């Protein structure tokens, strides 16, 4: 049986964003705010701009400049701090300005008390995102990929 996404592409020409469900424990998030609405120390802001630059230009670096053999694809960042410090806003702004969908992973749906199940659940989620240019955001960890490589 063909993957439902292939049928959707064939019939509509596009793939709809997945909805939060038992089979996809992540929710699409976005913001109407702008970079000027995010209050950060200048050093942190500079690091976020570096992250934005990498996400924007990683295709050029990896393919055009043949850096794929020397650099790992994708980007992983750890956002930390107490609630209200801008972690989610930063993730959504990065998605907005780099043209990537941002998904907040529902960790309660992924974590299992059984050995190996948490890893299996996370792997299934990232496999689903493999062919997309998404940013996955769970609690304090963000993972962005381009063309399915993260």
Image (spheres, grey):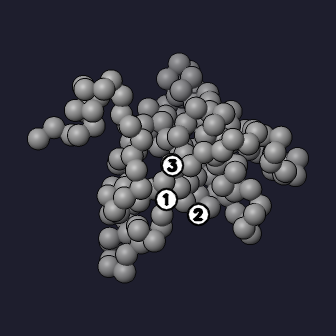
The answer, for residue 54, to whether it is visible in the render is: no
| Residues packed near mark 1 inside 10 Å, few (<14), some (14 to 19) or many (20 plus) | many
Above or below residue 40? Residue 146 is above
Q: Are marks 1 and 2 in contact (CB under 8 Å)?
A: yes
Look at mark 2 in the image and give the residue it sits on.
139
Above or below residue 51? Residue 67 is above
Question: Quick one: label 1 or label 3, which is nearer the N terminus?
Answer: 3
Residue 69 locus on image (x, y percent)? 48, 32
Residue 132 locus on image (x, y percent)? 42, 37
Look at mark 1 in the image and give the residue it sits on.
105
From the image, state whether disc 2 or disc 3 is nearer to you. 3
- How far is the residue under mark 2 from the one under mark 3? 14 Å
- Residue at 63%, 37% in the rendered image: 96
Look at mark 3 in the image and give the residue it sits on.
28
| Residues packed near mark 2 inside 10 Å, few (<14), some (14 to 19) or many (20 plus) | some
Question: Quick one: label 2 or label 3, which is nearer the N terminus?
Answer: 3
Left or right, 110 with respect to 117, comes to right
Residue 5 locus on image (x, y percent)? 28, 37
Q: Are marks 2 and 3 in contact (CB under 8 Å)?
A: no
Farthest residue in the left direction?
Answer: 1
Left or right, 114 with respect to 95, comes to left
- Residue at 11%, 41% in the rendered image: 1
How many tags in the picture?
3
- Viewer-proximal residue, 113 or 31? 31
Question: Quick one: label 1 or label 2, which is nearer the N terminus?
Answer: 1
Left or right, 111 with respect to 93, comes to left
Disc ID at residue 125: none
Residue 28 locus on image (x, y percent)? 51, 48
- How far is the residue under mark 1 from the one under mark 2? 8 Å
- Residue at 76%, 39% in the rendered image: 34
């Amino acid at each position: 049986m063909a993957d439902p996404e292939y049928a959707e592409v064939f019939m509509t020409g596009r793939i709809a964003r997945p909805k939060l469900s038992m089979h996809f424990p992540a929710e699409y998030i976005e913001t109407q705010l702008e970079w000027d609405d995010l209050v950060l120390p200048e050093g942190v802001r500079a690091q976020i701009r570096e992250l934005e630059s990498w996400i924007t230009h990683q295709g050029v670096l990896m393919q055009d400049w043949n850096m794929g053999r020397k650099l790992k694809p994708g980007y992983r960042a750890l956002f930390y701090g107490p609630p209200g410090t801008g972690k989610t806003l930063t993730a959504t702004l990065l998605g907005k300005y780099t043209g990537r969908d941002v998904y907040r992973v529902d960790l309660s749906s992924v974590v299992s008390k059984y050995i190996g199940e948490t890893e299996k659940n996370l792997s299934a989620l990232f496999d689903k995102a493999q062919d997309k240019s998404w940013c996955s955001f769970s609690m304090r960890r963000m993972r962005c990929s381009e063309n399915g490589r993260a």
